[in-house]
Image (spheres, rainbow, N blue to C red):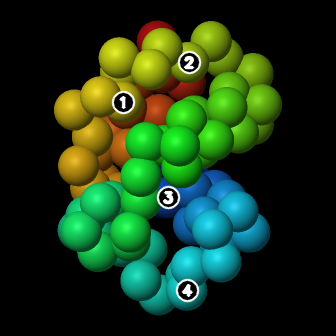
Amino acid sequence: MENREQILAAIQGLMVEMFELDKEDITLEARLYQDLDFDSIDAVDMIVRLKEITGKAVKPEDFKTARTIGDVVEAVYKMVNA
């Protein structure tokens, strides 16, 4: 996962599998809490999975400000390219 497109695809796959969302709803503009019905438990579950996928230590504070899928993609991008 070096680029944002690969990261978005991985996040889409994760969210479809874990939260039974429709892939077409998981866009960069989609808001986690309003559009995708995310809650804090879902966010923690996703962070744990991202850590497994990337093999990187995930700091929850890196994701605290994430409001959209695009924000999550950006946070993961910075994490894997740090």
Q: Is residue 38 left or right of residue 6?
A: left
**41, above or below 5, in the image:** above
Residue sitting nearer the eye, 73 or 58? 58
The Cα–Cα distance between marks 1 and 3, rounded to whole angstroms, is 15 Å
- First along the sequence among labels 3 and 4: 3
Q: Which mark is residue 8?
A: 3
Q: Residue at x 27, y 40 (%)?
A: 66
Give the residue type that dot 4 points to: Asp
Provide the residue designation for mark 1: 63
Is the residue under label 1 in contact with that under label 2 (CB below 8 Å)?
A: yes
Residue 46: x %, y % from top left:
59, 44
Q: Residue at x 57, y 56 (%)?
A: 11
Q: Residues within 10 Å of mark 4 (few under 14, many from 20)?
A: few
Q: Residues within 10 Å of mark 3 (few under 14, many from 20)?
A: many
Residue 3 makes an appearance in the image? no
Observer-side mark, 1 or 3, equals 1
Is the residue under label 4 in contact with that under label 1 (CB below 8 Å)?
A: no
